[in-house]
Image (spheres, rainbow, N blue to C red):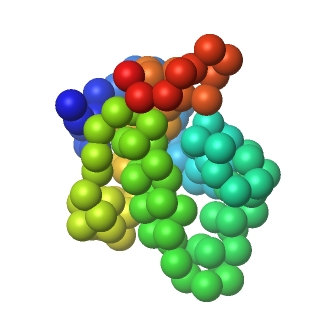
């Protein structure tokens, strides 16, 4: 099993163009949503603050999406390689973040009744 949508399916549902524009203009919001869904450090606020600090202060724009890609894939029931997560996070952060957000929505990760790997 692998991702439900491709990395470059930027207009794919759920989310479509809204997800794409939000991720490109203010990536900390979807990163916060993803962080909350995967029970990441600090929930939604932790994801937002983490992205701002890692990107704005330290220049590590790839750190949150890389970590989250590995966690989303694990919770969705498949394994993302560290190399692929690093390449996607470094080379096309918004596309990779959109893909993760769609996967969270499609697999209902973090929603009430979610039982883990599907």
Quarter of the image where one finds residue 92 = bottom left
Instruction: Please identify the quadrant where the N terminus is shown.
Output: top left
Residue 42 drawn at (x, y percent): 76, 54
Residue 15 drawn at (x, y percent): 49, 26
Judge whether 112 appears above or below 48 on screen: above
Judge whether 19 appears above or below 41 on screen: above
Quarter of the image where one finds residue 86 = bottom left
Judge whether 42 appears above or below 13 on screen: below
Residue at the (51%, 41%) spot, across then down: 21
Residue 97 drawn at (x, y percent): 45, 48
Residue at the (45%, 37%) spot, across then down: 75
Judge whether 30 appears above or below 111 on screen: below
Instruction: Please identify the quadrant where the C terminus is shown.
Output: top left
Q: Is residue 96 visible?
A: yes
Left or right for 31, reference 46: left
Residue at the (58%, 42%) spot, across then down: 38
Closer to us: 82 or 99: 82
Closer to us: 112 or 46: 112
Closer to us: 99 or 22: 99
Quarter of the image where one finds residue 10 = top left
Residue at the (61%, 85%) spot, across then down: 58
Q: Residue lying at the far bottom in this picture: please name it.
A: 58
Left or right for 114, reference 7: right
Tally of numbered discs: 0
Q: Is residue 94 visible?
A: no
């Amino acid at each position: 099993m692998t991702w439900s949508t491709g990395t470059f399916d930027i207009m794919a549902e759920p989310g479509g163009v809204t997800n794409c524009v939000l991720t490109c203009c203010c990536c900390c919001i979807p990163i916060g949503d993803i962080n909350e869904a995967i029970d990441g450090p600090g929930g939604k606020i932790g994801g937002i603050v983490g992205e701002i600090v890692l990107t704005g202060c330290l220049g590590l724009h790839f750190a949150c999406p890389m970590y989250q890609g590995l966690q989303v894939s694990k919770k969705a029931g498949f394994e993302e390689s560290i190399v692929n997560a690093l390449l996607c996070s470094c080379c096309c952060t918004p596309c990779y973040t959109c893909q993760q957000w769609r996967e969270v929505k499609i697999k209902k990760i973090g929603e009430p009744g979610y039982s883990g790997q599907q």
